[in-house]
Image (tube, helix red, strand yellow):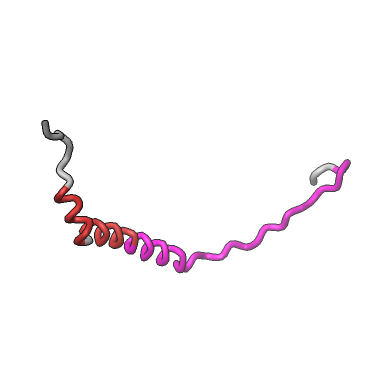
Amino acid sequence: MRSTGPPQVPITTALTQGHYRWRHDSILQELADKLERERTKKRPRQKPQMIHFVNEGQKAP
C-alpha cells in the first residue's frame, strides 16, 4: 500500500532548482532594505534629560 502523504518528488525538485531559496532570499532582502531605511531615517533629536540622583536618606525634590 502506498503512502497518502504529500508528493516528495516535486518538492525535492523545487529545492534542487532553487525555487524556495529564491523566494526566501527575496523576502529577507526586502526585510533588510526596510530595516536599513528605518535605521537611516532622519528623526528629530530629543534633548537629553538630566537624571537627578538622591543620596541615601535624602528625599527627592
Pinpoint residue 15: horizontal percent, then vertical percent.
Answer: 22, 56
- Residue at left offset 46%, top offset 65%: 39
Residue 6, picture quadrant: top left
Q: Is residue 51 left or right of residue 20?
A: right
- Left or right of 56, for residue 31: left
Residue 55 placement (x, y as % from top left): 85, 47
Please identify the quarter of the rendering in which residue 32 is found: bottom left
The reply, left or right, for residue 61 in relation to residue 8 is: right
The residue positioned 56% from the left and 65% from the top of the image is 45
User: Which is nearer the eye, 1 or 36?
Assistant: 1
Q: Is residue 36 above or below residue 4?
A: below
Direction left: furthest residue? 1
Camera-side residue of 15 and 22: 15
**What segment is highlighted magenta in the picture?**
29-58
Q: Is residue 57 above or below residue 21?
A: above
Q: Residue at x 12, y 34 (%)?
A: 2
Query: Residue placed farthest to the top in the image?
Result: 1
What count of labels does the image hold? 0
Q: Position of residue 28 (x, y in %)?
A: 34, 60
Q: Is residue 34 magenta?
A: yes
Instruction: Give the quadrant of the N terminus.
Output: top left
Could you tell me residue 10's position as x and y percent? 14, 50
Residue 33 included in the magenta stretch of the image: yes
Q: Is residue 11 above or below residue 45?
A: above
Q: Nearer the viewer, residue 12 or 42?
A: 12
* Secondary structure mostly seen in the magenta stretch: loop
The residue sitting at 25% across, 62% down in the picture is 22
